[in-house]
Structure formats: structure tokens, C-alpha cells
Image (cartoon, grey):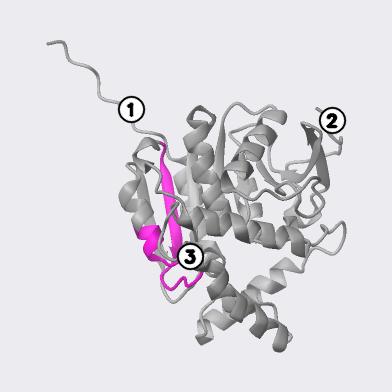
Amino acid sequence: MNVTQLSQTSSLKWNDAPSKSVEVAGTKFVYRRLGPKDGVPVIMLNHWGAVLDNFDPRIIDGLAATRPVIAFNYRGVGASGGEAPLTVAEMARDAIAFIRALGFQEVDLLGFSLGGFVAQDIVLKEPGLIRKVILAGTGPAGGEGIAKVGLVSWPLILKGMLTFRDPKIYLFFTSTATGRRAAKDFLTRLKERTADRDKPITMGAFLRQLKAIKAWGAQAQQDLSEIRKPVLVANGDRDRMVPSSNSVDLARRLPNAELILYEDSGHGGVFQYHEAFLRKALEFLARQAPTPPAAHPE
């Protein structure tokens, strides 16, 4: 392991957190870390086309007030090396190797959209590594409409280009006045960091991730009953990228899950309601697991 050594303090904020790197099987993975040194870390798994600068600073800073938080780029994305994987399973294997390379024996996961696909696959592959999971704006393998994310997204991406606006306005938020205000506030937060910004994703990596999303939507359903870990499922009630019905389906099929749907919000509901989501996420992560009932002799 070859880790770039950079100083870190618990008072560090996301917008000032230095970029670090760790080499895993010959590939450099770029990440940022903040929060206290001790505690179960939260590993952040990002969405299609996202780099480090696409994580919401308010959510990460809020989580890092009480626990370590590590956000990283998938292989071939941003400043990370290698070629972007064509399957969610490959991304999950990379994430597991990255977590192991940093020396963690137990972590929590927070996966948004594509990151939620990856989080599910990680916990199915390595359940002993995971304590709790937060799935936001996401859905299960074979879920409703997931194979059509590209068909839904391309017109909205084109609309953003033609109107000289960030496509996330149309992809993540509703067209209501509330949704538009939330989109403006979110995009302003993403621009707060001015130094040491990440490299943008290449079109090649962007398209390879889309192929992975399509494959996830087309593959057979996974047996989510195997995921016994506590899971918080969150989304907007009007998600058109990964339809909100998928969040309901996740909560129904996961044996230890709770669901929250935010009103008048889309794919980026957790960003629109970032304060409420952060309160819920902190409460969920801090909650003690119930003690199993004592066995009674027969």
C-alpha cells in the first residue's frame, strides 16, 4: 500500500479536505477523509458521472462531526487511475479492496444512486465488513426503470446543455418552485470548494458507468433477504431517474430496513432535504443494535 501522507484534523471541513491517494493492486484510488480518527467510518459511494466534488458538503460535514468519513472516486473516475468498470460487481470489488487497503475492519456505507447499487453488492459480497447501510435515490438489481436510466436522462442532459444550465437541475429536482430553489442551493454548495478540485469525469468513463447501470437494471434480482444489516432507505417521492417505487421495493425486501420518502422531491431528495436527511442519518448510525433475546433452555 502506498498512501499519500497528508495532515488531517477533526475540525477539517469537506471543502478544505486534502485529496489523498492509495494504491490498490497497481491502481491509484483518490479519496478525501475528514472527521475524528476513531469510530466506525462512513464510506461514501457516489452517483453516475460524479467525482469527489459532487458530494454534498453539508451532508459530509454533518456526518464527520461525529465519525470518520471517507469519500473516494471509483476506478477510472476523476483523478483515480485505471479504466472505469463496466459492471456494478467490479465497482463493489474495487470498493472492498479500497476499504481493506485503508486498514478498516468494519465500516458503514452511504450509497447514492449508482453508489447504492454498489453498496448492496458490497454487503452481499462481504457482510462481515459492513455494520450499517444507507441507500439513497437507488434501487435493487432488476428494479423498475433502472435499465432505462439513459433513455430518461439523455433528453434532460441535452436540455441542460441547450439552456446553459447544470443538467442536475432537471435530473435531481422537481420543476416546482421548491424543487428549483433546492437545485440552486445544492449547486451553489457544490461550487464552494475553490482549491484542489478533482478532475472532471471523462466521457468514456461516463458512458462506461451508464453501461454498468443498464446491466444492473437488466440483471436478475438479488436475494436481498440475505442482507441482515440495518438499512436506511431514503429518496424523493418523485424520482424519475431511479423511480421511487424502487425505494419502496428495497424497504419491503430488506429484512431490517426503514424507509423515508421526502415530499415534492426527485432523485436528489436527500440533497433537497439535506438537513432532515442528516438528522435521520446521524440518528440511524448512532442507534444501538437491539440485543438478541436470551435463549431459553428447553
Q: Indicate the position of residue 293 as horizontal and vertical percent values.
A: 25, 24
Secondary structure under badge 3?
loop
Task: Quarter of the image for the C terminus: give it.
Answer: top left
Mark closer to the observer (2, 3) = 3
Q: Is any atom of residue 65 visible in this view?
A: no
Q: Earlier in the sequence, mark 2 or mark 3?
A: 2
Quote the CA–CA distance across marks 2 and 1.
Answer: 40 Å
Q: Indicate the position of residue 126 as horizontal and vertical percent values.
A: 52, 31
Was residue 274 drawn as part of the magenta stretch in this picture?
no
Residue 242: which numbered mark, if any?
3
The residue most toward the left is 298
Crowding at dot 3, Cα within 10 Å, few <14 / some 14-19 / many 20+, comes out as many
9 vs 290: above or below: below
Magenta highlight range: 229-248
Q: Are marks 2 and 3 in contact (CB under 8 Å)?
A: no
Crowding at dot 2, Cα within 10 Å, few <14 / some 14-19 / many 20+, comes out as few
Mark closer to the observer (2, 1) = 2
Viewer-closest of 128 and 25: 25
The residue most toward the bottom is 163
Q: What residue type is labelled 1?
A: Thr
Q: Indicate the position of residue 11 as horizontal and vertical percent values.
A: 74, 46
- Residue at label 2? 2
Secondary structure under badge 1?
loop
- Residue at label 1? 291
